[in-house]
Amino acid sequence: MPSFKSILIREFKDSSIFTLAIYLPVIINFVLIPFYWQKLTPRDFGIIAIVEIVTIYIGIFSGLKLETSLNRFYYEWNENQRKENITTLWFVQWGSNIIIGILAITIVFYLHSFIFPDIAFIFFFLGITSYTLESLFVFPTNLVRIQKRPTFFTIISLIKSLLLISLNIYFILILERGVIGYYNANIIGHGVIAILGTGIMVTEFSYRFNYPELKKSLRFSLPLIPNLMIASITKTFDKLLLQKFVSTEALGLFSQAVKISSLINKLYQAIKSSYVPFLYKTIFEEKKKDIVYKINKFYLIPLFVASFVLSTFVDEFITWVNQPAYLEIIKFLPYLILVELISSMVIFYTPGISLAKRNELLVIPTTINSLITILGSFLLIPYLQIYGLIVIRLFLAVVSLVIRAIISLKVYELKYDWLSLFYYLFIYIGLSVAGLLIVSKSMIINILFGFILVCSQLVFMVIYLMFKRQKSS
């Protein structure tokens, strides 16, 4: 039986590889932001943000969410039937993506002039086409991830990301084709990657279909759709209302602030790529629930440290870029980063809903969130505009975590380390306040002071882990 130390080392290795594969291209894109700001205007980013609202609703139905069934049942399947089950789910997921994409383009063609009269249809057509092609790669990457093949996952992730980055540089920075160039780059890139995904699935291909397993998988995945539908309203309603009170340029600025803060969400997704297989394998195959409790506090560290580093130094980065049109986003970022950090705690403190196969219960927190979003948007956005939207999102992040945690505890018995979360959050907020109180006109002094704050955060975390280890022994 492997010791906790050996399990921790194994998971650290796997999570590091998964994180590097996903996050390295994210860092490259972040570095390229100043160059994109020179070629794309805030209005251009506003157009992209509005098209993304539409693709969020398409994502509700894409692939009938069968990739979630793959994640949930892979380690429960008999090895002799795995290829058969994988092929069955993949065919249905792939075909449904194409059909849903075509239907979405048709619907938007007739409705866009009523909902978004200032945005040309061509942008929606290109955006939906790009999203549909991108969705074809979801199932293959989930398969590689759930099979715990970190090296191969790293290779295909880097190929995808570097290809997209290269094409965006070519179409936006070199050819200077603006928003059209952005979508051309993504369509070509995602088209090539979809072919790569098909090649991956050939190695898992079976000529037999398992219809009973398909029914079982759909019974698990389809209940997610009502929840996702409500969640999408929660995610987009405030933006839809915001565009009635601010210009497309202001919406574009806010979308750039969200994009920068989403570096934390990208890190969360990278860590989740390793954590979810670990969670299911540890509980269902290795039968060691206690390991999950012990290891969670280590998974939280990179999220809290990265959030604090980004919050501390991002204003200096934007100031250094020296693009006056985008300086306004600095004041939004600390709050949006905190929203992303709190939201990223969901997988660590509410997995019981998925483990108990009770996805239909997600309708409860998402319905509550939607009601809060709609009511809060009408009350706050007309008066506070972007700041009202930020207040709503911060409140929702906390409420969603609490409600999901309560439901998770009710439906599945699993111990959670809440003390570590509260301690990390207390240190984060305390040091963030200290950083806001001590601000110099000198960029060098601000950077040095920020470095001291980051080191202080690490020291406090190490002391806490040493205390926990001594107490447990």
Image (cartoon, rainbow, N blue to C red):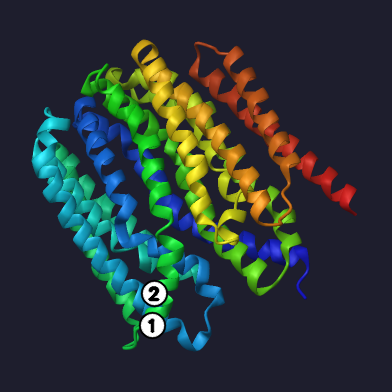
Mark pair 2, 1: CA separation: 6 Å
> Where, by quadrant of the figure, is residue 62 drawn?
bottom left
Q: Which label is found at residue 214?
A: 2
Q: Is residue 380 above or below residue 343?
A: above
Image coordinates of residue 94 in percent, x first then y, are 27, 68
Q: Is residue 287 above or below residue 447?
A: below
Along the horizontal axis of the image, is 288 left or right of 339?
right
Q: Is residue 465 above or below residue 332?
A: below
Quarter where residue 160 is shown: bottom left
**Dot 2: element:** helix
* CB within 8 Å, label 2 to label 1: yes
Q: Which residue is mark 1?
A: 210
In which quadrant is the C terminus drawn? bottom right
At horizontal 57% and vertical 63% (from top left) the residue drawn is: 14
- Whether 22 is drawn above or below 79: the answer is above
Q: Which mark is residue 457?
A: none
Q: Is residue 206 left or right of 462 when viewed as pictured? A: left
Q: Is residue 388 left or right of residue 130?
A: right
Instruction: Give the image quarter of residue 75.
Output: bottom right
Can the viewer see residue 445? yes
The kind of secondary structure element at disc 1 is loop
Q: Amino acid at mark 1?
A: Asn
Q: Residue at (53%, 84%) from the top-left corner?
A: 78
Q: Amino acid at mark 2?
A: Leu
Of residues 211 and 201, the one nearer the viewer is 211
